[in-house]
Amino acid sequence: MNEIERYLADLSSRLRVGRRHRARILAEVHDHLGAAAAHREACGEPPEAAVGHAIGDFGPAPMMATQFNAAAGARAMRRAPVVAAAAGIAVCGGFLVAATSQPRTGVSGAASLATQLVFLAATIAGQVALVAGICTASRTASLWRAPTVPGEHRAFVRRSGLICAVALGVAALGWSSALLLTARRTAQRDLSTLIPGVAVMIVAAAASIGATYHLRVNPDDDDVVVPSRPDVLGLPEQAIGVVRRHPVLSCLAVAPLAGLATMSHAETTVLGALPWGLAEVGAVALAFVVLGPALDLRHDQRRTRAAGVRSPGH
Amino acid sequence: MSAEQLKGHLDPLVLAILEQGPAHGYAIIESLRSRSDGVFDLPEGTIYPALHRLERSGAVTSRREVVGGRERRVYQLSARGSTALRQRRADWRLFATAVSDVLGLSPS
């Protein structure tokens, strides 16, 4: 094995990119080093020294791998909202197909209390998936034209995409269970739409979790951040920034609205719908408290305090 | 000039070099060095992530070519790249004039 091959082997072992991309990088680097060494030899350098200098001028393998990994991570990050959107559309489509199997009286008309509770939990999970999906898309859009993307943003997009996918999975399971339980209690059920609809929901959610989990965003490989100009794609992120600056106010504004929306779908009297509305309000507040820091919708006070202790200068 | 300082401006520099005609990575880095009189002397490998990034954004295209028995990937400026380069030149002119004015370097 000569020195160029050793360098390529070292670089290859550090690359965290797809198979085809790896092959292209290694071919280009091999060509570059060969051309550089040949040029030096033509200028009178001994062959071994020419190769050594060519490798030295190219840059250390760890540094080069970091740059390639950071670029590949940014590309992988941009796939996260696409995966989330495709899965969301498939799950909603599957739900609509499966729901046509239900009797005209609606879910609550034929469903037990337990089924309705499962349905509410699934709907709340669906709302979490929607919010996480918006956070994923918003951050990605704001960095869409950026030449380089810091590792922390790539990690955030993967994390929020994963929250979206898992919440979508919970919603798909909950909606499927509710529809199947309701179908068991009714005579007028249509299994020809129920089963395919449920299958689409489950498969789409599972595929979304798998695809998001395996996104190679390489958050530990940080390249030099090249500043980019803010543009219209950054507007959603600015709107989310308002929520981040006023978390309590935002939660107080959204939770009652979500509660009222749930009450309007409860298909019962206002008094009968009240517990469902209150459950929704509680769930929104709880989700905001628990998932808010992970989705960067509010700052984690404990983490902020800990950071303050570590760096008293700030 | 350090590689870190240069990286923020690498994309338009690469586009400007490709404006003269298609070139492979090694020729681009050589041209960058010679046209800057050796001031822009960054690790040569740094050019490839930039080229891949520019290709993804549609500013350059690439094709494989056999040159002297060696297969090489040759990069070429696209129409979108030409537009981007014009924009970056205008931005740079504005920025450089403003900095020169503040530093007192502008010819009075």
Image (spheres, coloured by chain):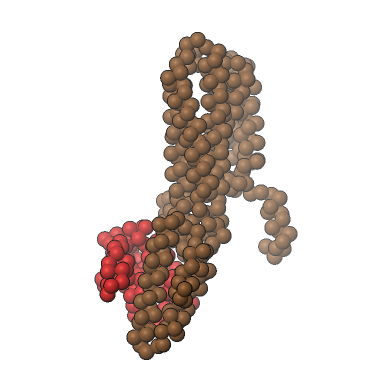
Chain colours: A brown, B red
Q: Is residue B14 above or below residue A177?
A: below
Quarter of the picture containing the C terminus of chain B is bottom left
The answer to whether residue A5 is above or below residue A232 is: below
Residue B16's quadrant in the figure?
Answer: bottom left
Question: Measured from the top left, where is residue A220 in percent x and y?
Answer: 57, 60
- Residue furthest front as drawn: A1
Q: Write the residue at 40% across / 75% down.
A: A33
Q: Residue at x 61, y 43 (%)?
A: A292
Instruction: Report whether B16 appears left or right of B43.
Output: left
Task: Indicate whether A51 appears above or below B71.
Answer: below
Percent across and percent down for residue A98 are 46, 23
Tell me if I can see residue A138 in this picture: no
Q: Is residue A223 above or below residue A204?
A: below
Query: Which residue ends up furthest to the top in the rendered image?
Result: A187
Kindly identify the residue that appears in the image at 52 percent across and 21 percent down.
Answer: A179
Q: Percent from the top left, x then y, of residue B3?
A: 47, 74
Residue A66 appears in the figure: yes
**Identity of the residue drawn at 38% across and 75% down:** A34
Q: Farthest bottom residue?
A: A44
Residue closest to the eye, B32 or B80: B32
Of residues B44 and B12, the one drawn nearer to the viewer in this rendering:
B44
Percent position of residue B64, x then y? 29, 64
Count of marks, rendered view: 0
